[in-house]
Image (spheres, coloured by chain):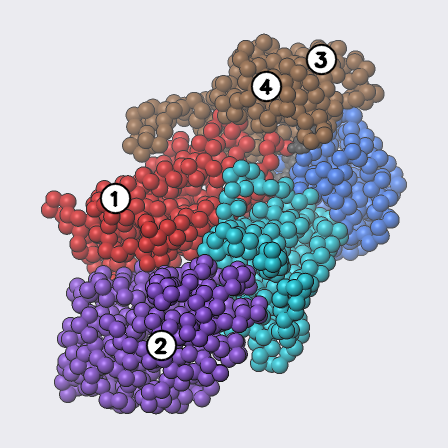
Chain colours: A red, B purple, C cyan, D brown, E blue
Amino acid sequence: MKYGAGAALAIAVVLPLVVPNAYYLEILTQAYVFAISACGLNVILGFAGQLSLAHAGFFGIGAYTVALLATKAGVTFWAGVPAGIALSAVIGFVVGSICLRSKGHYFAIFTMAVGLIINLIIQKWESLTHGHVGVIGIPGPGAIGPIHFESGIARSYLALVCLALTLVATTRLLRSPVGRTMVAVRESEPLAAAIGLDVMAAKRLAFTISAALAGLAGGLYAGFIGFLGPESSNIEMTFNTLLYVMVGGIGSVVGPVAGTFIVYGLSQVLQVLQHYQMVIFGLALVLLILFMPKGLAGVFRRPSTQPTPLAESASLRAGSSKKGDK
Amino acid sequence: SSSGGGNETVTIGFTGPLSGGAALYGRNVLDGLEMAAADINDAGGVSVGGRHVKIAIVPLDDRYFPNESATNAKRLVHQNSAPIVFCPHSGGILAIQGFNASEPSFIVGAYSSEPQILESGNPLTLMIPPKYPIYFDAFAQTMIDSKGKRLGRIPGAHAYAKEWTKGFSAVWESKGGTVLTNNEIDYNTTTDFSSVASKALSEKPDVLFVGGPSQATALVIKAAREQGFKGGFVVMDQAKFEEMNKLVPMAMLENSVGVMPTVHHPDFRAARFVEKYHLKKGADRDPPREVSLTYGAMRVLARAMELAGTATDARAIHARADEAARTLPDEFKPSELLGVDATGHMMQTTVAAHVVGGKFVPLYLKQNE
Amino acid sequence: MELLAQQILNGLVTGSVYSLVALGLTLTYGTLQVPNFAHGHLYMWGAYLSYTLMSSAGFNYWAAMAVSITVLALAGVALERLVFRPLRNDSPVNAMIAALGVMLFLEAVAQNIWGEEFRHLESPYGGVVSVFGLLVTAHRLILLGTAAVLMVALLLFLTRTIAGSAIRATAQNREGALLVGIDTNRVAMTTFAISAGLAAFAGSLVAPISLVYPSMGAMITLKAFAIVVLGGMGSVPGALVGGYLLALAESLGGTYVSATYQDLVAFVVLALVFTFKPSGLFKESV
Amino acid sequence: MLLEALRLRKAFGGLCAVDEVDFAVEAGSITGIIGPNGAGKTTFFNLISRALPVTSGRIMFDGEDVTNLQPHHIARRGVARTFQATTLFGDATALENVLVGYRQRTSSGVWDALVRSARLAREEHEAHAVAHETLAFVGLTDSAERLARDLTQEQQKRLAMALAIVARPRLLLLDEPSAGINADQTRGLIALVEKIAATGITVLLIEHQMQMVMHLCRRIMVLDYGKKIADGTPEEIRNDPAVLEAYLGHK
Amino acid sequence: MLNVRDLTVSYGSFQAAREINFEVREGELVVLLGANGAGKTTVFRALSGLTRAGAGSRIEFAGRDLSSATPRAIVDAGMSHCPEGRKLFPALSVLTNLRLGAYRCPDRADIDRRLERVMALFPTLSTRTGDPAGALSGGQQQMVAIGRALMAEPRILLLDEPSVSLAPKVVRQVLETVAAINRAGTMVLLAEQNAYAALEIAQRGYVLENGRIVLDGAAADLMQHDEVRRAYMGA
Ligand SMILES: Nc1ncnc2c1ncn2[C@@H]1O[C@H](COP(=O)(O)OP(=O)(O)OP(=O)(O)O)[C@@H](O)[C@H]1O
Ligand SMILES: Nc1ncnc2c1ncn2[C@@H]1O[C@H](COP(=O)(O)OP(=O)(O)OP(=O)(O)O)[C@@H](O)[C@H]1O
Ligand SMILES: [Mg+2]
Ligand SMILES: [Mg+2]
């Protein structure tokens, strides 16, 4: 595992230098950015076991914060991104406090509604967001001392550094008592409460962290692309992020990153098929999930000697939300 | 830009919606480009500096999402060395304009009548369709004269429709007309237009303003007629009579003003173009307006390549576009082309239509810049 | 007053469609807990098949509809057998990803077959009738009637028969169901068949008043999810009533508030309800 | 009195599962609760552990009113429980189960995790030590690294107790610890409960296994239809006609 | 009647039952004894088709080979299983749970008769018929599980620790009922932690250890067997 991580890091560092042209660099950079968002979704879904379908909403909040602060108030990218993270986190905290009182499927559909509402607010609040037209001319990251970020390579490394920090943070989180608490909540809420864990606080924390990471990814995205439309926060974006996480392997720290590269890469490669692009992509998704139900991470994980019992997979069954025990 | 076998090829890029709700529109825009490319290649290709260069159109789907347009454009320019990238929606165009002048530079073939595209002052844009305000005056005058002053409105909720509605309403009022409630709806997701039609009709309008994709617009018209509406329709330029007519009978379209179907265009070049189209696609399919406009644009740019003596230098090609449009032989034009102005707008005579007695009566529009 | 009546009528028509779609989703999502995000795409396929049979093969409307329902029911069976059954023991999120894949696939295949063009199915009942002074097309009345009849029949089947209980038993404890002799595989396939058949029925009914195009199922799927959850996962009456109420709210909201936000109604209502009642309005069905 | 229930009541719709029960538990004792199926025993536990809201009445713990606390708050005050159907974190190892059980005693947060603070290291060290000690206490040292769901029923019961006592609670609620365990192994479990009690933890026990109750408890409460029908020493209970009628059956 | 030959069941690489041989003859009540994890439940699951038996295993009932039959075919052949862990339908009503026990019985009147019988056995349930099974107490749910198995009126009843979580009085009632049903002609295979009570009503018994049968004999003999007394009766 150690060697694997080292090798991955080495590849990631070299990659921006060897890609043939600016297009690949762009794809690479975007994949890094989306991977950050996927890591965020993994915190709430993989660690704490709550399926949030509002994720792209927070991506959009981070992105629009950077875009609007820059174009309307002249705030730099470097100040805008932290502001975007903060705003996403604050809104995530509030939304989480409300939505997390619902459980299982109810939570998933509740957050789906919240995500759609965020997206529609962005679309309709034209005086602020320019609606469908979007925000154009968002300035990218400015120079820090001698380091300039105009070039694709520099931006790619910036995204890579952010992704690496995200990975370190989520790994440390998962392996800490805080992460163990989230996992305990995922496995059984009544038991977690009975051993003195604040279930709501743990879920809310996971939700807030996931929103903050989505906000970070969104902020980077806005600065890098230079243009922002409401589709950055639509449900398709959430679904895509979910694909990255699931194909990579839910709950494992690096899984979502691998998933992002595979799925996003696949979607770019398949562009050449034109009409048949989505036919193949759709099929590929179904096959991936059928043959790797635990994602890539599951393939590399040593198999348990015991088959998974048929028992209800606790957290996503709305029916199991009954209090007390039997 | 060149491939083996002595056969030189230049890639022309296209990024637009090829799936999802706007796929038909994207496909039509692409059709015009592909048809022009085929004709040019059949005639031996573009001759630049004594060489004959073939044109290959590479289309990529962006599902109407501007960020994907930008990524696609990068791919087309860096991977395929395309000197020109066409895009049929303003969001995508604006996103692409953000980097098209940096190296390697490329021309943005903008199929959108959104004025903002030219206002940004991008040096390498070619805007293809007429800007939409051109229709306002004639549409308003015709309907006020023939049907009355109360204008009910059921426009689409997309940005383009919003701008259209705003501009047209102002002109309507300036002519002494009354503007009723704006019942903006999403034409792409609404399943049943009856309820919005009921609402608009409850205000007893003389004329209804409608506008979105042709088929949805036709259903709005149908819903209104079925609920007894006898007045006229102002149809935004996005919807086409010939496509609407596939869903609703001409009788329902009576007293509407909108874009002139290419088949009924009074220009002799248009008639010739329609003939050519019928030969290619079958007599039962009429060319939509997008096809004829992008066909013309591709022809103009190919000619500009010849004039500039390069198939790759975007700046040089763009610089000769005006000359190319003026000197393009009639047989290559789908309608009258007047040139390309300093902002990069392709100028052409524009004719609208007023449906009277089941016939399309031409309305000649002033090219008011 | 007339406007109100007209809007209520319009709401009921749309409501019939919503209810049919939501009812199908209640079976697969509410009961079997398979988040079938491809449900609206089955509805789209149903509409296309009816359209093709009528316009190219000369079928009459009802015959076309019957074939389309049958084909989609079989497709539902195949979907269960090939995609969702193997994922049965995994997290529902896996099934959701698979459903998204199926959704993209169905849409892309439809686009390859029928092209990008919007299609319109001409109803044989195109005439306009006046009901209490309101003008409606005959087709809308037929839609209202057939949808209602079918829904009542299905409601009785699901809630009053042991076969209906078997579906829910299978979903709640598969081993328990096996032990009492329920063929759980067949039950799951039947459930998917009914669900997809309902979608095809709804799609064929709506085609004459609406447009048929590859992405026509996207928005209605999201709304159906909202309806199923609001009505109480797995509750058949909940889905039926929810569908009608949502459509009425949309058409009245669109008239008296703003048509711009019509599509938002379902989600705002859902968000409000769950904010104040985190476990929904209704308990799960018994 | 460590725990007092005052006119405690819980209704599910029209059904009164716990009906005006007054009951007190002395610190340091092992007390039993018995009664027919559906008498309200588990519900009584759910009320005390705050997994369910009470309908009326009060719960006092260590002299303080805890009626409206959240479940994790009462747990942190020292009330631990096991569940009737053995509940564990099945996909985690025995050690990880016990570790997370100790979490309520530690206070490091997100920040400590991100910067790997000294406090985190100290607490982790401490948690591991206590966890291993607890596993040894319940006799699972050798199974520390095995997944909880791979353990035998009896080992799972022991692990559930380890999970409950690792944070040193003051009151331990055990719901049918012997269900599904055979006679031989039940004796081991009895010994374990006695050992737990010997460390000063007060035990409140629901059981249908009469030998176990009679052997362990100094005092027994009997519930029937939510009402307390008897409360006394094992000897008194064994001979109480109401108990014989409702619960034990005539011999 | 029920004849099991060389039954082997594996979970992955772990063999939970190894070449087990036993039989239940017409009219018999047979007890399966064994410590926790000995493999009793595994045997039951293999019999009712929930778990696949390994190659070479042979399960014969009433002259039919059921080794690879579906659970449904096994139910139709006359086996009914009250499983460990109850496996109820928690959101369905108690009544529906019980009715589903007779899922393969087409005769409505007959089902009503069986229902009455179950209600008479567990009077506490009769006031709760409309409630979701998941809202019952642990012991009440166990009653529903036993009731559901009885609803099938099988030729052989497989009971996997039926008395778990039941109050002493009810345990006795259940075992008495099982004995009565057996006297009326139904075969019974019973696993039970309370070995003494089980052997009292049984004719024969088998002792399982680590997935193998290590001992078998008449119930009375087993009751006197020192090892059995020590290991399973707490004596
Ligand atoms: N699904 C499974 N996967 C892996 N191993 C299993 C599974 N089910 C049971 N086992 C193992 O098989 C062995 C036999 O288990 P079984 O449940 O049959 O025993 P039992 O005699 O019924 O025990 P108990 O008295 O605890 O019910 C045990 O070691 C158990 O851990
Ligand atoms: N969530 C609930 N909803 C409705 N009724 C409930 C609920 N939980 C418990 N009950 C009812 O309350 C009564 C008491 O149940 P409880 O679980 O406390 O019994 P118990 O004494 O623990 O029984 P057992 O010995 O069988 O476990 C029962 O009649 C049960 O059906
Ligand atoms: Mg209990
Ligand atoms: Mg067992």
Question: Label 3 vs label 2: CA separation?
Answer: 90 Å
Q: Chain of mark 3?
A: D
Q: Residue at x 72, y 37 (%)?
A: E131
Determine if residue A10 is in view.
no
Quarter in which the C terminus of chain B is drawn: bottom left
Q: Residues within 10 Å of mark 2 (few under 14, many from 20)?
A: many
Q: Which residue is mark 2?
A: B290
Q: Specify the amino acid type for callout 3.
A: Asp
Residue B309 vertical position relative to residue B178 in the rendered view, above or below: below
Residue C246 on image: x %, y %: 57, 52
Query: Quick one: SS at disc 2?
Result: helix
Q: Nearer the viewer, mark 1 or mark 4?
A: 1
Q: Chain of mark 1?
A: A
Q: Residue at x 19, y 64 (%)?
A: B121
- Check chain identity for marks 2 and 1: say if they share one: no
Residue D211 vertical position relative to residue B174 in the rendered view, above or below: above
E188 or A32: nearer the viewer: A32
If the picture is divided into quarters, which one holds ligand 2?
top right
- Tell which residue pokes out farthest to the right in this image: E184
Q: Chain of mark 4?
A: D
- Marking on residue D193: 4
